Image (tube, coloured by chain):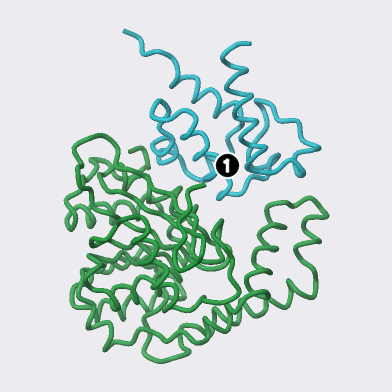
Chain colours: A green, B cyan
Amino acid sequence: MPEVTARGVRFHVQTMEPSGTGFPDPPVVVFVHGLVLDNLSSFYYTLAGPVAAAGARAVLYDLRGHGRSERTATGYGAADAVADLFALLDGLGHSGRVFLVANSFGGVVALNAALARPDRVAGLVLVEAYGPAEQAGEWTEDMLNTLGKSALALEYERLADQLLEIGWRQRGRQAATADALINGTSLLDDLAAVEPVRPADLAAVACPVLAVYGEHSDVAEAGRLLLRSVPDCTLHVMAGHAHTVLREGTAELLEVVLPWLSHHTGTKVPVAAAGGAL
Amino acid sequence: MTQSSDVLGEVVGMLVEVVGEDFLLDTEIGPDTTFNDELALESIEFVALAEKLQDRYGGRVDFAAFIAGLGLDEIMNMTVGDLVRHIEARLQPAAV
C-alpha cells in the first residue's frame, strides 16, 4: 500500500499517472474526500480516472482517520487538515502549485488550503462543499446533529457488532469505522470548533473556483455564497440532484469539470465526456 | 496448469490478502463469486486489490483506464471471473 508519513501520521495515497505520453510535466490534481464513511475510493471510481486520462497526475489520499490512513486520537480540525495536505504533498515531491478537487467536507479543507497557501493552490473544484457560510454554527449544526445521533446509536446499541453478527460485513465494518472515529477521537469536538469561511474571506480567494451543487442539496446556499463572494467563481447547479452528485451525477459532473480543468491546466477535453467511456 | 487457473489463483490470493483470511474461511472463491454480494468487498478494498493487480501485471493491464470506464456499481457487481477474463484478454499477445 502506497503510504506517506507526514507530520508523524501515516497516510494512504494513490496516484494515477496521465495516460499516454507527451506529458513531461503534467498538472497535479489532488482529490479531497468527505467525512467519516468517505475515503479516497469515492473519487477513485468517479473523477480521478478521467482526469488522469485527460493528462493530469491525479493524487488521491485518505484524510487522517479515514479509509486506510492512520487514525490518530486528535487533529481533525481544518488547520490540521490543511497542514496534513501540504506536508503530504511535500512528501510526494509536489512542491509546485496544484489543483484541488473536493467533495462535501473536503471543501472545508480545500478552501482553507487556498486561503492559507495561495502560492500552492492554482484552482479549486468544489463539489457540494461545506465551508462557506455567513455565520459560525450555521453550516456545522446539521452535520454535528447527525453525527451526534450516530455516535449514540453506535455506542449504546453496539451497532457494528450486531451488523457483523447477522453477516452484514460491509455495513458492520463501516459502523465500526464510524464508531472508532466518532466515539474514539476528538473528531466531533474538532469539527464543532471549525470556523466557517465567511464572505470577506471568500473575497480573498485568489484562484479560480468551480462550484458544483445539487439543485435540492441542503448545502446549496454555500454554492450561491461562493458565486457572490469569490472573485473568479463559476457555479454549476445540477438539476434534480441533492448532496450525492459525485456518486449519482458522475457523467454530468465530468462534463463540467473536464473542460474547466482543461481551460485552466491545458489538459485534454474528451470529445464525449459523458458516459464514462474515456 | 493453464494460464486461466494461474490468473484466477493469483487474483484469489490477492483477495485473501486484501479481505483477510478470517472472513473468507466459509467462502470458496471461484469465477462466479461476486465482489459485492458474496465477498462483501468494500470500495476502498477494491482500490487495494486494483493496486495489487497493477503491481503484478503492470502496464499490460491498465486498471486505471479499466476502472475509469466502469461505474462503481458495475465494478462491485462484477464476478471474480469477469476480472480474470479482462486480465487474460490483455495478457494475450496482440494479433499481428
- The spot of residue A166 in percent (x, y) is 82, 53
Left or right, B11 with respect to A108, comes to right
Front position in the image: B74 or A193: A193
- The spot of residue B12 in percent (x, y) is 65, 30
Mark 1: which amino acid?
Answer: Met
**Residue A202's quadrant in the figure?**
bottom left
Residue A20 position (above or below residue A3): above
Report the residue at 66% width, 59% height from top: A174
**Residue beneath disc 1:** B76
Which residue is at the far front? A8
Residue A261 position (above or below residue A22): below
Report the residue at 44% width, 15% height from top: B92
The image quadrant where one finds the C terminus of chain B is top left
Image mark 1: chain? B
**Residue B93's quadrant in the figure?**
top left
Left or right, A112 with respect to A139, comes to left
Category of crowding for the residue at label 1, using alpha-carbon neighbours closer than 10 angstroms: few (below 14), some (14–19), many (at least 20) = some
Report the residue at 68% width, 40% height from top: B39
| Secondary element at image label 1 | helix
